[in-house]
Amino acid sequence: MEFSQVATIAGKEFWDRIRNRWVLAVALVFTVFALSIAYFGSAQQGAVGFRSIEVTIASLVSLVIYLIPLIALVLGFDAIVGERERGSLDLLLSMPITRLELLLGKYLGLAGALTFSTVAGFGLVGLVLSSQLDLNALFHYFGFMFSSVLLGCAFLSLAVMLSVFAADRTRASGLAIAMWFFFVLIFDLLVLGVLVVTAGQWGGEALPYALLFNPADVFRILNIFSMDDVRTLYGLSTVFPPALAQPWLLGLVMAAWIAGPLAIAAWRFRR
Amino acid sequence: MADISPAQNDAGAPVIVARGVHKHYGLIHAVDGVDMEVRSGELFGLIGHNGAGKSTMFKMMLGLIPLTAGEIRIDGAPVPGSDFRAVRRKVGYLPENVVLYDNLTGAETLDFFARLKGVSRAPNAALLERVGLTHAARRRVREYSKGMRQRLGFAQALLGTPRILFLDEPTTGLDPEAIRGFYAILRQLKSEGVTMVITSHILAEIQERVDRLAIMAAGKVQATGTVQALREQMDLPLWFDVRVAPEDFEAVRNALGSLPVGAVEAHDGHIAVQCSRDAKMAVIAALAALNGKVRDLTVREPSLEDVFFGFSD
């Protein structure tokens, strides 16, 4: 593999998103939402202003779990199928570049743009709040940002995989939306449904492991498990065994969610 | 398939060689046993109807799609093969309906492809000048006309001074002046020893420009050779356009009618006579014997289009 080829493709993808202000727009969305949640999250209870990092992160997790998968899927669904449909893929592949290098370059460039906007958006809010946070709170906030990046990269990997398999952009976009619904809205309902219908008699012990099959749930567990104040606010995640809720272990699971779909995409793209 | 090229001994060594190439998509045989050679420094035409297999051959020669069977070698190296990077650095490709990136400028487009190709970016400005795009180098491609995009695509194909060029319908969208400029560049490249394979639906455009060509139909090469050799092989009739004074019209028409000619069409002081290649000299002699009654004479060879339909049908 020639990394310079990967870097060339990645650089173009990244700078394309900087130039068309995609990164700026997404960073602004994250900043505005995060600031609003931090300062006005408790307005319904009659209080305004920053209260605690735990509550803020818990609210941000709820936001991010909807928003980042959607943004990542929209960002990546046409990475390959778009080039193919526009007719530029043949020209790219006529260059001294392998399909794997092209795929990795595309992924890394898009992941770079998503990471940059996530870190810039939430990082700015972290800076604003930093005077009111102690080291422990800052550590939690940093962990939230890092896991948000991992969540984005995992869904981006899924999007790129879709992009390789889909016959055209229309189908790719439909599949991306379906994937978002499945992982963000339906998956937990299904698991809960099975649990309720069987009165916990079937699959009860396997349930925590089932959550690992959804990167959105892994992200949720990563962020709420270390915070006793908010753990009880979340249904399914609270049944997760503490022994499995190690950040490094969940980080590895997230890494598998990034590498797995990409590996499948690379296998398919080579054929 | 016949290769009828009187000039073949003068050409260089084979640079592109295809042997028994097949490409099947299920039951469809897009390419069906193609043998082909393109020699060093040659401008080689590949013509055929839509769906004849030209683009599939192009893609296989570029290593973009795998062969079902057979072998292709570019400059001695198998395609696809482990040496593909070295091969592709020697190759330039202009796809049909080239699609470039709208958000990049012309200069950035060349920079991007030069990086990918691993060649110096220093000559990019000269390349843009060569295709007449210096004035638009800093404009985004989205502002380019179709012809300008095509010229930028051509500049992209010339990155790294390739030794082999694949040009798929390269003059699509170009105006007549740009087409003339394009072929002037091809002549120059040919003089530098660049080997070129070109496809075009505008047969009149390439018939005087290619050294040899292959006619493809239904996935097979029906014939290969120079345009003249293919004409002779098809043995298509010639046309004589004879211009005569009104008072001599009937005399000339009667004289032509007694010769071994085919169709005779007469109107407005013009007589068009079709005859076989073998009868050509007899017709010329008969017209010369008419003692000045013939004011002008034009001999029309069958066009490449006639040859093409002769082979492909």
Image (spheres, coloured by chain):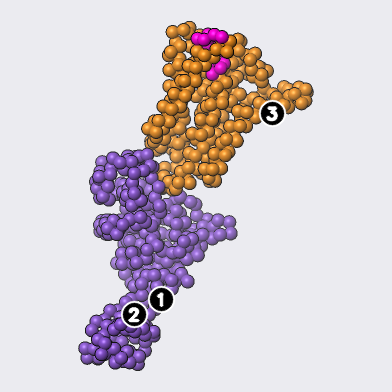
Which label belongs to residue A190?
Answer: 3
> Going by the image, does A159 lie left or right of B135?
right
What segment carries the magenta color? A46-60
Chain ID, mark 1: B
Which label belongs to residue B234?
Answer: 1
- Do the residues at discs 2 and 3 belong to one chain? no
Counting the numbered discs, the total is: 3
Q: Amino acid at mark 1?
A: Met
Q: Nearer the viewer, residue B94 or A117?
A: A117
Q: Is the residue under label 2 in contact with that under label 1 (CB below 8 Å)? A: no
Closest to the camera, between mark 1 and mark 2, is: 2
User: Colour in which chain B is shown?
Assistant: purple
Task: Name the residue beneath numbered marker 2.
Answer: B239
Chain ID, mark 3: A
Which label belongs to residue A73?
Answer: none
Mark 1, Cα crowd under 10 Å, few <14 / some 14-19 / many 20+, is some
Residue A74: % across, % down: 51, 34
Residue at x-position 44% and y-position 36%: A105
Q: Nearer the viewer, residue A146 or A249?
A: A146
Q: Is the residue under label 1 in contact with that under label 3 (CB below 8 Å)? A: no
User: Colour in which chain A is shown?
Assistant: orange
Q: Amino acid at mark 2?
A: Trp
> Going by the image, does B80 lie left or right of A221?
left
Q: Evaluate whether residue B121 shows in this view.
A: no
Q: Nearer the viewer, residue B192 or B266?
A: B266
Residue B270: % across, % down: 30, 82
Q: Amino acid at mark 3?
A: Leu
First of labels 1, 2 by sequence position: 1
Residue B29: % across, % down: 54, 60
Residue B256 picture quarter: bottom left
